[in-house]
Image (cartoon, rainbow, N blue to C red):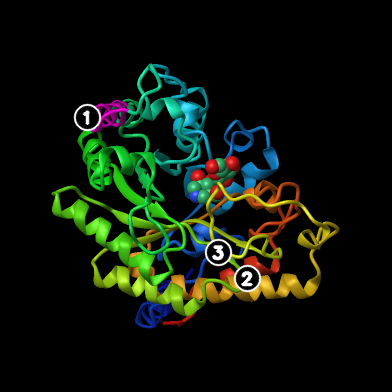
């Protein structure tokens, strides 16, 4: 290139970058770029991983993961029942595989989840005779668990869901065994223990339905209590297991506005959109909820009609506009699975349905929802 032409080219790309940053948009990315590059200047884009993926048996998914995602969450293998199934036994075969995958593929690696009421064996809360533990004894069990698990991956797992789903829908503390035995400072203790083991790790409080104002305010109050105890909380994780008609974009918008006002980052940690008819009459993502299979609850077993495909794309677009608007306090958007085939929503709350909640279809092909999401990047939506 002649010097004058090169100067012109440099000048044009500098002008383009300046124009982009003035409008709050990003510089163009290559045509074959994936989500992580398209949203590079806004937030990380992630996925939950299952053993088929991190053991690399599902080879088709690996290409998708490499192209689109730069942050991972283990869907199940770091839950208490997997890593600490019986008293005194830690089992890291699967989680070691998960972390090794993340390192091989240059991911920001997160851990999920240290303290939860679900997928936690009963022995955790009882003594060897089956009697409920005292507060001091349960705190010792919690501390031992966190020291082992966080300690094993110190400096390798970069962020932890320390406490999961501790709140009721009205923002009060859920009456879990943690709460009943330890009291309402159990999250403070969990964060304290995790921070002591790995002071560099990001630490999150994670929950669903945080768009509901009462629950959102409960989460903010909880973070304030933990911070008041002198322990850092990096962000609230909003799971975002969405329905087609819930929550509204306005509620999601208010949630991030409230987080910002409280000086708390808000991450999206388990995003999917359930396109199937509601099997229960609430908006829960509570894994304990179950419902019976009926044909009317599984209308798209043979394929997703175009009208629903289009509606799903519109819904993803509307949600991503809100994320984009709040990108200054959103560090990541993580999808709960890679393709529709992987989703927990094929099995919950009704086992054996065919759901379509993610951006990639069962063959790994991007859906119209993918295009709707990509169209938001670089838009001047504010
Ligand atoms: O996707 C997970 C599914 O495979 C498990 O069977 C289920 C059991 O508890 O947990 C699912 O993941 C949940 C996550 O850990 C916490 N938030 C709600 C998620 C969907 O249920």
Q: Position of residue 255 (x, y in %)?
A: 38, 71
Per the picture, the main secondary structure of the magenta-coloured stretch is helix
Choose between 104 and 352: the one closer to the eye: 352
Label 3 and label 1: CA atoms lie apart by 36 Å
**Residue 244: mark:** 2
Residue 313 position in % (x across, y down): 65, 72
Is 56 above or below relative to 328?
A: above
Could you tell me which residue is drawn at 76 percent across and 60 percent down?
A: 297
Q: Residues within 10 Å of mark 3 (few under 14, many from 20)?
A: some
* Disc number placed over residue 161 in the picture, else none: none
Give the quarter the ligand 1 occupies: top right
Can you tell which quarter of the image residue 52 is in?
A: top right
The residue range painted magenta reads 133-144
The disc placed on residue 283 is 3
Left or right side of 134 for 332: right
Q: Which one is in front, 208 or 127?
A: 127
* Residue occupied by mark 1: 136
Can residue 48 be seen at all in this image of the molecule?
no
- How many C-alpha atoms fall within 10 Å of the one at disc 2: few (<14), some, or many (≥20)? some
Precedes in sequence: disc 3 or disc 1 = 1
What residue is drawn where x is 48% and y is 44%? 73
């Amino acid at each position: 290139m002649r010097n004058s032409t090169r100067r012109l080219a440099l000048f044009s790309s500098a002008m383009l970058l300046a124009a982009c940053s003035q409008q709050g948009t990003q510089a163009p990315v290559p045509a074959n770029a994936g989500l992580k590059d398209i949203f590079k200047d806004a937030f990380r884009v992630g996925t939950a991983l299952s053993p088929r993926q991190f053991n690399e048996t599902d080879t088709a998914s690996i290409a998708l993961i490499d192209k689109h995602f730069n942050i991972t969450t283990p869907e199940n293998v770091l839950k208490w029942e997997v890593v600490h199934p019986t008293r005194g036994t830690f089992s890291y075969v699967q989680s070691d595989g998960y972390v090794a995958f993340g390192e091989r593929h240059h991911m920001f690696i997160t851990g999920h989840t240290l303290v939860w009421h679900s997928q936690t064996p009963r022995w955790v809360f009882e003594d060897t005779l089956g009697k409920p533990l005292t507060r001091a004894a349960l705190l010792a069990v919690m501390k031992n668990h966190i020291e082992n698990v966080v300690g094993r991956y110190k400096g390798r797992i970069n962020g932890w869901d320390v406490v999961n789903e501790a709140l009721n829908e009205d923002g009060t503390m859920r009456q879990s065994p943690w709460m009943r035995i330890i009291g309402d400072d159990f999250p403070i203790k969990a964060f304290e223990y995790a921070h002591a083991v790995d002071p560099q790790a990001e630490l999150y409080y994670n929950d669903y339905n945080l768009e509901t104002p009462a629950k959102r305010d409960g989460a903010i109050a909880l973070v304030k209590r933990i911070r008041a105890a002198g322990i850092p909380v990096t962000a609230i994780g909003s799971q975002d297991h969405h329905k087609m008609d819930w929550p509204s974009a306005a509620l999601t918008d208010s949630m991030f506005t409230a987080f910002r006002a409280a000086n708390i980052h808000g991450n999206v940690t388990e995003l999917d959109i359930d396109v199937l008819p509601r099997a229960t009459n609430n908006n829960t993502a509570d894994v304990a909820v179950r419902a019976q299979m009926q044909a009317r609850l599984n209308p798209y077993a043979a394929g997703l009609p175009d009208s629903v495909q289009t509606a799903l794309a519109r819904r993803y677009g509307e949600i991503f506009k809100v994320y984009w608007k709040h990108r200054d306090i959103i560090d990541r958007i993580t999808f709960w699975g890679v393709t529709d085939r992987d989703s927990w929503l094929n099995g919950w709350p009704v086992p054996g349905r065919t759901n379509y909640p993610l951006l990639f279809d069962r063959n790994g092909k991007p859906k119209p929802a993918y295009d709707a999401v990509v169209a938001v990047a670089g838009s001047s939506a504010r």
